[in-house]
Image (cartoon, coloured by chain):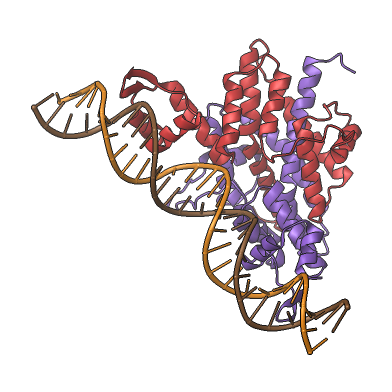
Chain colours: A red, B purple, C brown, D orange
DNA sequence: AGTATTGGATACTTCTACTACCCAACACAA
DNA sequence: TTGTGTTGGGTAGTAGAAGTATCCAATACT
């Protein structure tokens, strides 16, 4: 498959594919000569993945590249690889001051109340801290009760995800977890928005069919 | 309060505040003369809100402006206002072809299976359709079973949100719902990521303290 | 042999979100 | 009253992200 065919198959302009090649988001095709290279199904899949991550998920090319590198070359520790993936996802956070004994007080207290055992400087902690602080700053602080309600429901979702990992294939598990974390996030948000709509509809127009 | 004070209080450069004024994200201060205007607590709140929406939530200024206009001047129908707000949130979707009798087949089937009564062209439908299509394109299609598991948990969250609306104050309800939808989304994502981490930790290191 | 396409490189464009600078009008302190 | 500093209002410049366009010599296909 030549590059123009790859473009036709995926609907992505050839100039953009060349850009992805330059930027390291797409592996080079197999060279068949100085002016010809062969692209295959792995390239089609990769291009679709890049478009899904940068388009619907809303990642920057830099963030997508980091995720893809983790999928291509995962460590053997799911736990650590997942941490690297999460730290690549938005919202971007700054490194915590290593001297600060309690860099994420809101998130730490939340985890303690929930009884969740998480590493205190896991990337998700910084993201939760930032999210809680942003809500407070904006005048809608999140109550402990609400946070616990959210956490319980999301814990159920996460358990569903991890219960379905192929336990006998660590590499597939890493890929599934890393990509699933990122790719299903838009589904999560869309479903929450639709649920708000559904419930508001029942509250305001209970008589409709 | 002068503009420099507003900048000092919020930590936002004066040049940026002027930019927000020009762009209609921040209402003008009360003029006290040709070269002096007075800013108050509503301006501080608004600046914090803009920074929360554009920073942590990740909205563009255009999207944040749309949300803020809805909060400033909501219709009297929570149902419709919420729809406008959701359509301003990412991922951006295109208008459906009005001749297409079934513009969002994946999302429609999902809603039917779930028994959710939603308007078939609600903005969230396009977003769900796009999210499901992106996951499929990327090689991780979402099973019906998984979608239902996610939907059940997120419906619980949405019910929690709407059960706590001040029923006697429609304007406050609109503000709470619109801003809560947007501002709590980063919390939702951070909690899901942390839950993955927590559960993976228990699976891989069940013996740790 | 001739035409079209490719890989590779470089340059250009568009958009967003600022950031910097300027200026005349004013406020305030000495 | 005079000097110093700030303000509103405007214009212009910047940096980064994500492409897009063009050129070229080297092929591949017909």
Q: Residue furthest top?
A: A168
Front position in the image: B74 or A105: A105
Q: Residue at x 62, y 39 (%)?
A: A186
Q: Which residue is drawn at 68% across and 67% down?
A: B75
The x and y percentages for residue A37 are 35, 22
The x and y percentages for residue B189 are 72, 38
Give left or right: position of A125 versus B97: right
The picture quadrant where one finds residue B63 is: bottom right
The x and y percentages for residue A115 are 89, 29
Using the image, determine if residue B77 lies above or below residue A19.
below
Front position in the image: B202 or A84: A84
Give left or right: position of B174 versus A208: right
The picture quadrant where one finds residue A96 is: top right
| Res. A173 visible in picture | yes
Using the image, determine if residue A47 lies above or below residue B40.
above
The x and y percentages for residue C21 are 61, 64
Q: Residue at x 50, y 50 (%)?
A: B94
Give left or right: position of A112 versus B33: right
- Count the marks: 0
| Res. B107 visible in picture | no
Quarter of the image with the N terminus of chain A is top left
Front position in the image: B114 or B80: B80
């Amino acid at each position: 498959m030549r590059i123009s065919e790859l473009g036709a198959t995926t609907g992505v302009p050839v100039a953009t594919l060349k850009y992805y090649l330059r930027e390291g988001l797409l592996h080079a095709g197999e060279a068949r000569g100085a002016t010809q290279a062969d692209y295959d199904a792995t390239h089609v899949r990769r291009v679709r993945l890049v478009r899904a991550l940068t388009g619907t998920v809303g990642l920057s090319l830099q963030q997508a590249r980091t995720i893809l590198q983790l999928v291509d070359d995962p460590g053997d520790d799911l736990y650590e690889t997942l941490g690297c993936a999460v730290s690549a996802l938005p919202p971007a956070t700054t490194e915590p001051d290593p001297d600060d004994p309690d860099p994420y007080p809101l998130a730490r207290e939340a985890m303690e109340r929930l009884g969740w055992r998480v590493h205190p400087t896991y990337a998700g902690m910084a993201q939760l801290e930032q999210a809680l602080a942003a809500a407070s700053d904006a005048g809608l602080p999140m109550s402990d009760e609400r946070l616990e309600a959210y956490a319980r429901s999301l814990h159920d979702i996460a358990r569903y995800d991890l219960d379905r990992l192929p336990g006998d294939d660590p590499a597939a598990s890493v890929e599934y977890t890393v990509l699933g974390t990122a790719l299903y996030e838009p589904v999560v948000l869309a479903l929450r928005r639709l649920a708000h709509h559904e419930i508001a509809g029942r509250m305001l127009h209970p008589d409709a069919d």
